[in-house]
Image (cartoon, grey):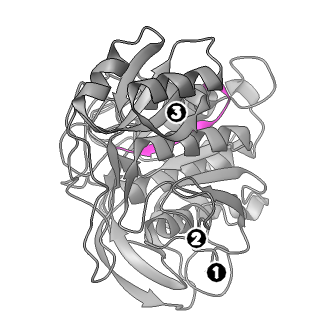
Amino acid sequence: MIFKKVILNSITIVAMLGLLLAANVNFAPAEANDGNSGRKIIVFQNGLSDLQKDEVIKKAGGEEIKNLNLVNAKAINVPSKAVLEKLNSNPLIARVDDDVVVEALAKPGSGSTQPSQVLPWGIDRIDAELVWPSGNTANPIKVAIVDTGISTGHPDLKDNIKGGINTINPTKSFNDDNGHGAHVAGIVAASNNSVGVVGAGSDIDLYGVKVLNRNGSGFLSDIIEGIEWSINNGMQVINMSLGTSSDVQSLHDAVALAKNAGVIVVAAAGNSGGPVIYPAAYPEVISVSATDQNNNIASWSSRGNEVDLAAPGVSIYSTYKGTSYKTLSGTSMAAPHVAGAAALVLNTPVGIYDANFNGKWDPDEVQTKLQDRAVDLGVAGFDSLYGWGLVNAYNAVQP
């Protein structure tokens, strides 16, 4: 039975303890708004045409940035408090949300270039390699890496990359110019070849959804657009190794719509050592905390009743920017272990877990099986550190 999450009520954006740092590059997060001006998400009342929405924004003095059709909204720039007041008082507008800054959730690490292939300890710990001899390498399950992109020319990733989008600038590539998304992608689906590493499902179809910039930060509106793209393009799993402490209704609406569309949404719990952040804190999301090689919770891993599962997240070796490899830590690294395990489950018969009697896996059914077959850690049963326990891919694919 899926544990009901508690929705937190945080209003400030936090520069997370574990922000990813590219070598010799400091984070320069996208500029947050001051509450009275800056980027906003304007959610409209139902029934308005796009032309009518444009007219509302224009009359108020706002500057349109992009459509967010998934949540019946537009991202706009609000140049002043006066413009914001006009928008808030307009009866055609249901809500004005802050277009908050969201961050990648990894800690600094060390890198290398094209070594001989090794089995990363995290993939070994979740027993993914025990699944592969059965012929299940999660081919052709579609997994969207909603992140900084994926390194399109990486020898351990390029064969599995099937497409993607750059929602920051759709005219540009989704190629990873930071390294975080490539690292996450490698944990999910690095190829089983002669170099580097191997992912949880070595034949998963990877899709790079670039929503964070080269510094590992980005606006919520770009993430919502990435979720919409994932739904529209038939993604079966979305991995979001990113987060914010701000509970924004538009983000909650987006992940709820993804789940309702049959997409499994997996997210990193956070690296503050405090409460679980968003989107992981939402009940529609599989929230993942991080463990070390001794199966202990990482000191910096966020915790709370919103945590569903734990997975390896300390000193994880994976693919990185360009053609390189890097060892990183964070709940960013834990979440893709669960996303990969979910993909392996999707490639098996639903069997007795077919609660809806529709003959196919639904998100709740996959989550229930992952939780039922997890290795219990900490106190017996559910707890706020490990959720239902350490994800185990081999256990999860058994009938």
Find out whether residue 261 is within the magenta segment.
yes
Location of mark 2 (residue): 175
Find out whether residue 108 is within the magenta segment.
no
Q: Residue at x 73, y 73 (%)?
A: 159
Circle 3/circle 2 CB separation < 8 Å:
no
Which segment did they paint magenta? Answer: 260-269
Which sits in the foreground, 114 or 352?
Answer: 114
Q: Amino acid at mark 3?
A: Asp
Spatial separation of the CA atoms under disc 2 and disc 1: 8 Å
Above or below, 388 against 20 in this view is above
Q: Residue at x 40, y 28 (%)?
A: 282
Q: Amino acid at mark 2?
A: Asn
Above or below, 154 against 64 in this view is below
Spatial separation of the CA atoms under disc 3 and disc 2: 37 Å
Which sits in the foreground, 312 or 262?
Answer: 262
Q: Residue at x 59, y 20 (%)?
A: 52
**The disc label shown at residue 153, or none:** 1
Q: Secondary structure at mark 3?
A: helix
**The disc label shown at residue 372, or none:** 3
Spatial separation of the CA atoms under disc 1 and disc 3: 38 Å
- Mark 3: few, some, or many residues within 10 Å (few <14, many ≥20)? some
Residue most extreme to the top = 91
